[in-house]
Image (cartoon, rainbow, N blue to C red):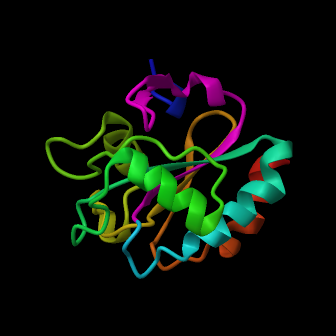
């Protein structure tokens, strides 16, 4: 059977298993996030996208990752606190994961395989790489870390319609 986003289970920030089946029929933006990165201010734009489209069946899933310059050194609870206090983040920020290498979260192995980056490379290059997933659970598009959240607005609207 073909895998979709809903095929996976991940850990939330408290270590509890969360089946991504709960996002069936929704448009999902998956982002590997970090608190001490030059792109960290994108949290503001991500939250604005979330607020704008959440009532239309859109959700953002943040996955903290410490694999790039050790820019996410905190514990899961420290990360939650940072996101809430500094950016008012309301979208789900999951437990910390690896996105590359042998210990990569299975959902990330699938995302990278479904939407390779430049020159077909599957590796995630940096924090704030984004994957837009359609209502069918399949990857629509991969976005580079430098792509600002608001630049994805039209693709989200199209996926929601």
In this rendering, the answer to whether 8 lies above or below 33 is above
Question: Who's the residue at 63% across and 57% down the image?
Answer: 89
Does residue 12 belong to the magenta stretch? yes
Left or right of 64, for residue 23? right
Q: Foreground residue, 124 or 9?
A: 9
User: Depth check: 58 or 17 in front?
Assistant: 17
| In the image, residue 37 above or below residue 92 | below
Task: Answer with the quarter of the image where residue 138 lies.
Answer: top right
Indicate the quadrant containing the N terminus: top left, top right, bottom left or bottom right: top left
The image shows residue 102, relative to residue 128, as above or below, that is above
Q: Which residue: 22% across, 72% down?
A: 69
The image quadrant of residue 65 is bottom left
| Left or right of residue 80: residue 91 | right
Q: Position of residue 61 (x, y in %)?
A: 55, 46
In x, y percent, where is residue 38?
Answer: 41, 82
With 78 as the anchor, is 85 left or right in this view? right
Residue at 37% in and 40% down = 110
Residue 151 in view of the camera: yes
Which image quarter: residue 87?
A: bottom right
- Residue 27, how many percent across, how many down? 69, 43
Residue 104 shown left or right of residue 16 in the figure: left
Residue 155 appears in the figure: no
Which residues are the magenta region? Answer: 7-34
């Amino acid at each position: 059977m073909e895998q979709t986003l809903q095929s996976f289970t991940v850990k939330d920030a408290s270590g509890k298993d969360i089946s991504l089946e709960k996002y069936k029929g929704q448009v999902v933006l998956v982002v590997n996030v970090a608190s001490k990165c030059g792109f960290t201010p994108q949290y503001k734009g991500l939250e604005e996208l979330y607020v704008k489209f959440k009532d239309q069946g859109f959700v953002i899933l943040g996955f903290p990752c410490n694999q790039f310059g050790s820019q996410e050194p905190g514990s899961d609870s420290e990360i939650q606190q940072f996101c809430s206090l500094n950016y008012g983040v309301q979208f789900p920020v999951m437990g910390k994961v690896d996105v590359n290498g042998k210990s990569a979260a299975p959902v990330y192995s699938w995302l990278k395989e479904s939407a390779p980056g430049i020159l077909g490379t599957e590796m995630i290059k940096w924090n704030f790489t984004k994957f837009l997933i359609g209502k069918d659970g399949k990857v629509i598009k991969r976005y580079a870390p430098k792509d600002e959240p608001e630049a994805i607005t039209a693709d989200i609207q199209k996926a929601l319609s």
